[in-house]
Amino acid sequence: MTTETITHGWELVIGLEVHCQLKTRSKIFCGCATSFGDAPNANTCPVCLGLPGALPVLNAHAVELATRASLALGCTVHDTSIFARKNYFYPDLPKGYQISQFDRPLATAGAIAVGVQPDGTPRVIRVHRVHMEEDAGKSVHDRFADMSAIDLNRAGTPLVEIVSEPDIRSAAEAGAYARRMKQMLEYADVSDANMEEGSLRVDVNISIRRHGDAALGTKTEIKNLNSFSAIERAVEIEFVRQCRVLTEGGVVEQQTMLYDDKRNEVRPARSKEGSHDYRYFPDPDLPPLRLSASFVAQQAEALPELPPARRSRMLVQYGLPENDVEQLLATRELADRFEAVASASGDAKRAANWMLGPLLASVNASGLALSAHPVSVARLAALIRLEVAGEVSNTAARQLFTMLEQQDGEPLELARAAGLLQVRDDGALVGWIDEVLAENPAEAARFLGGEQKLQGVLVGLVMKKSKGSADPKKVNQLLAARAG
Amino acid sequence: MSDPVWLDRLRAHTVDEAWRTYDAVQAGPEGLNAFLSVDRSARGAETGRLAGIPVAVKDNLATLGLPTTCASRVLAGYVSPFEATAVRRLREAGAAVIGKTNMDEFAMGSSNENSAFGPVRNPLDRERVPGGSSGGSAAAVASGVVRIALGSETGGSVRQPAAFCGIVGIKPTYGRVSRYGLVAYASSLDNVGVFGASVAEAALGLEIIAGHDRFDATSAAVAVPDLTAAMSAVNEGRPLAGLVIGRPVEYFPATLDARIAAHCERALQQLRELGAEVRDVSLPSTDLAIPVYYIIAPAEASSNLARYDGVRFGVRATADDLGAMYERTRSGGFGDEVTRRILLGTYVLSAGYYDAYYRRAQAVRTLIAQEFAQVFASGVHVLFTPTAPTTAFRLGEVSDPYEMYLSDIFTVTANLAGVPAMSQPIGTVDGLPVGGQLMAPHFGEATMLRVAAALEHAQRAERMS
């Protein structure tokens, strides 16, 4: 059977759980640093090691960021939420429980738009809940030959877990939701939201049912997804697997699956999972988290402009095509940089063209981060100003951009040194015009006699004589004056 | 104004004096076994309210330099890299922390027989228990090694041993003293408490360790009153005039030992003579306190004790795989009572049982707290009850766990309600001390201690006459 035949008649039902590291400087319940890449166990203390007698104290900044994340996703932030203990044994879980939130989460009932439906209305995926929790440490199995090691630097890093409703219906939509989630969290300035570094982690819950059925099927959970495309590939594979199981009369087992990126395979996790009883109960070490309406209002005010609002504003303010705006919004860094270049150069249209064209191509080719790219905001704006003022031609501007990629220096100085500046001085231009007219007496006579169509030919000859450096606009003006 | 007599007596009890007594009572087959580790070099500071005064600390309070074992094999030899806030405050006041005291393992017990390092003997009768779980600290004070010691309370673990050993023991309001560095048993019930050779000495100890601490999110930002000053002027006239003492009838059941009841009634009579009005009140849910306690405390304990897994600190058993390592470390590391409570707690938190046990227990706990609030709102300032239903029993005498649990029947309520309470000696039965308990509204320690000091003075005057 082909893939199409197997999946025919089955509806895919997907919910995503997104774990997002909040970008606080210290951990959620102690003062240890949250920095990435330090020596193992360098950033630990009695609290995040779970030593006897140590107690958690909630990091106020983590609450601010979690609240902003919730508001950015359109959630209702509750005036009272409760930290609970999720009890299970694991070597990288220092206390034998994770402090999380259970039946009283920070926020509920939000939604994000992930694109446009065929009828033109936005495709909206509902967010079920957002809750705060601490991260666990890391088990390291490949460092020592015959034992495992534990690194607790990450233990106690503040997270929000964002759980969607099972509204997602395709692999592409799952990818779009995850990308849009990353974009929203990044714009809200609450997280680095980087899947490669693990500051954004996505688990996918998948089930299938017959089209038209209301009841949900048994779900499996796929973990270990480290990129957006991995999410899409894993969903496709698991969809086909579940369809095959049910078509062949089997039953889908509720279990945890792991995605293997190298083999592009989804397979059951080795262990137990599934039927864990976490014995949640309210953490007696932490009083209920009470947030006043004014605190929530302050966090709403502190939120940077989010993609939907920014899209509308940029369309009006810069008069750019929708597609360009969408591309510029891809990351907050790109959008910020575009607006800085547009403002410094005074030409938004050119700024967008340079950014989406040569700059992004160069960034992708070089592998450099946008912030580290040698064509800085100031240099790109200066280049655009030279172009607008007619100091350099389009062609010369391209050459100048390549020079900016490779060497230091002011764009104007580089252009001058390389002879890329257009000659606009009347004396020099008149000299070249006189020479061209003298060297081509027949054409000169006809042109001066009123045959205007010859002007183009003569401009071309002047440009050639100037080796491309003459400002064609000026040459045109001067020639027209002669004929007049 | 000259210093009061009690303060001169406290200052006269030097570190050298402490060691002389220690050497006489601690070791040997009939020794108290009150201490698990000692620091013979501790001298304290030259200044401070406790300058140079020897104190003892229960072994579930984290200390620098001395092990913190909770009298458990699983923490044998464990030395904490940080110090409990209460201990730090004692040292900052100049006290010499001379040692860590024996206890029931992880503070689970009422007789101090659950220590992995042997039981503590009662200094007043070496065949008897000192009470628990802070039996070592109570014995250290009762034997005269120190005059002030720290204990901890989850359901009566300071007041009951204070009663059994004939000394004063205070459980402050929940949140009054930081729990930072107190090894958790049941976090919502745990308190650091203080033993004293007299009401004033216990009050001084409390005053020094009390107060808000930013390392404990449940510690209260409530100012600490001058507790020792609150007790002056209790020696003359009718110092308790205007105060109403409640006598909760549920704490005086027909089954109460008549001799203990008689001592309580005598104390109530003395309180009347001191000017107080004594009024019968009712706390109807009192009989539910023990069952509620034995759901909530083990539930929290099952989670709090999960960290003793052999991974990061303490004892680790060798095994071929992780599951077996956990199993051997924990089975071998914990004693029977600790194991029993972990299993009980795991059960009541399990899916399908949570609502029937834990949730209902929390609802009843709220009811118990409301009943206390109502009684105090009705104009009652302080409650008076017996501390324990018996005097100190013989080592090995109580072997049934449930019978042992009933030893805390009059004390667990204050932990469930979070109110301050204390025990002080009010007489003897067959030469064994009887404790009287006072309980007060949240943060009402000053009034409670004033009543206690007046009663203590009246009792002493009566004995002298």
Image (cartoon, rainbow, N blue to C red):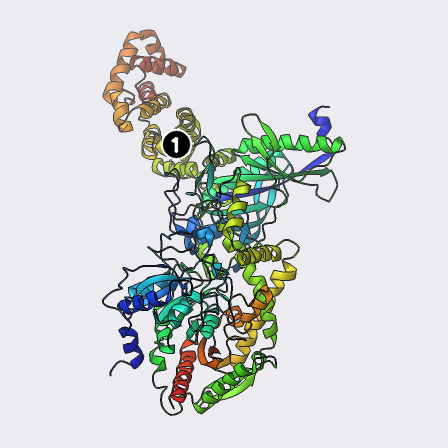
Q: Is residue A323 visible?
A: yes
Q: Is residue B210 visible?
A: no
User: Residue at 63% across / 45% down in the picture?
Assistant: A275
Q: Secondary structure at mark 1?
A: loop
User: Residue at 35% across / 61% down in the picture?
Assistant: B99
Residue furthest right in the image = A249
Residue B173 sits in which quadrant? bottom left
Number of callouts: 1
Where does residue B51 sit, x and y in percent of width and height? 26, 68
Query: Badge 1 is on which residue?
Result: A369
Residue A379 sits in which quadrant? top left
Residue A80 located left or right of residue B37: right
Nearer to us in this view, A295 or A32: A32
Nearer to us in this view, A228 or B370: B370
Nearer to us in this view, A62 or B321: B321
User: Can you say whether A53 is above or below B45 in the image?
Assistant: above
User: Can you say whether B446 is above or below A163 in the image?
Assistant: below
Q: Dot 1: within a 10 Å radius of its alpha carbon, few (fewer than 14), some, or many (20 or more) residues?
A: few
Where does residue A241 sit, x and y in percent of width and height? 67, 31
User: Can you say whether A312 is above or below A100 in the image?
Assistant: above
Where does residue A59 sit, x and y in percent of width and height? 42, 54
Where does residue A356 sit, x and y in percent of width and height? 44, 30
Nearer to us in this view, A322 or B62: B62
Residue B93 sits in which quadrant? bottom left
Q: Chain of mark 1?
A: A
Which image quadrant: the C terminus of chain A?
top left
Which image quadrant: the N terminus of chain A?
top right
Q: Tag 1: residue type?
A: Ala
